[in-house]
Image: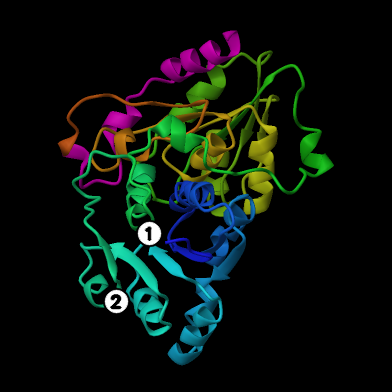
Amino acid sequence: MTPGTIIISRTDSIGDVVLTCPVAGFLKEKFPGCRIIFLGQSYTKPIISACDYVDDFIDWSMLKREEERNRVKLISETGADAIVHVFPVKDIAVMAYKARIPVRIGTTGRFFHLSTCNRLVPLSRRHSSLHESQLNLKLLRPFGITSCFSLPEIGEHFGLSVKDPLPDHFKNLFSGNKFNLILHPLSKGSSREWGLDNYRKLIEILPNDLFTIFITGTEDEGVRIKEMLHGNHPHVTDLTGKLTLNGLISLIGSSDGMVAASTGPLHIAAALGKYAIGLYPPIKPLHPGRWAPVGKHASYIFKNQKCNSCRHKNRCQCIENIQPEGVKQQLMKIINQ
């Protein structure tokens, strides 16, 4: 099968979408002339716009508001030869079926795929030992892409690049002779967090003459973060609430590295080849084995211990017990290299 147009459907969060970009990369490698359409949420479009392997974007946020027959008509008009349901959504699976897309790929684990998909891949994410990006690629088996790719191989297939230049008023904040470090302390509840007090301590122990620090996050997160930044920190710039996702991508592209929990911005940094240090709990499936940042200069820190007492809590003592001094040592090792 040599498909001309392939839809990749992934309608969840930023980090998930970043880790799906290699699906487009490996498809383009296998079928150089194919057209890739990404079906996703509107707020993740800047990620797809930054991906060199995707040709078009369909906004599911808008499409799902249409009557079903209009949705089916619009998808049919793409001329897609195949759709890959990376993130299963029943309405999308039914739409693709009714649009008569010839090849419809889904997992056996979703009941509605049994009646809407004609290429079923046995795949259980919950019990797998593979990384999320590796699991995504398992769905390419019907295309003859059957290898279990290593994370370094996957790291070469993101195709992310910065499209929009960073405005001068932000660019002028960067130092040419220091390590420009982004700290992204909060995650909007999407992952276990290291704790604001740990970030404050890290800021205090990092040498001012070696680091320029930027704090990023949403406007609401900025209210909490500002309480952490009490005191005089001339080498720290608070950018919470001041950046769109496009702006954040540009900022990350101009930086040297990032420290964050398992968040979308961390995965963006890793995919752009930055020194991305992820802070993780040992709880499955939140652990780095499943969600570590992937990229040439990506790494992570976690305490390899049982963490069952934290499983049903919002806070995790195991990740909070990662010492700021240990994060500093990893950053200093990068600088000394």
Q: Which label was assigned to residue 86?
A: 1
Residue nearest the observer in this picture, 307 or 100: 100
Q: Quadrant of residue 122?
A: bottom left
Q: How is the image coloured?
A: rainbow
Range of the magenta residues?
Answer: 309-337
- The residue nearer to you, when weighing 220 against 77, is 77
Above or below for 30 versus 301: below
Query: In this rendering, would 30 be left or right of 117?
Result: right
Image marks 1 and 2: residues in contact by CB distance under 8 Å: no
Secondary structure of the residue carrying tag 2 is: helix
Q: Quadrant of the C terminus?
A: top right
Q: Quadrant of residue 110?
A: bottom left
The three-letter code of the residue at mark 2 reads Thr
Dot 1 or dot 2, earlier in sequence: 1
Residue 329 sits inside the magenta stretch: yes
Quadrant in which the N terminus is drawn:
bottom left
Q: Quadrant of residue 165?
A: top right
Residue found at the far top of this picture: 336
Which residue lies at the image location 66% right of the left edge and 31% below the top edge? 255
Q: Is residue 149 left or right of residue 120?
A: right
Foreground residue among 20 and 157? 157
Asked whether the viewer can see residue 40, the reply is no
Is 256 rendered above or below residue 333? Answer: below
Could you say whether the residue bearing mark 1 is in a helix, strand or loop? loop
Give the number of the disc on residue 283. none
Give the residue number, with chain letter if any, for mark 2. 116
Q: Position of residue 183 (x, y in %)?
A: 55, 33
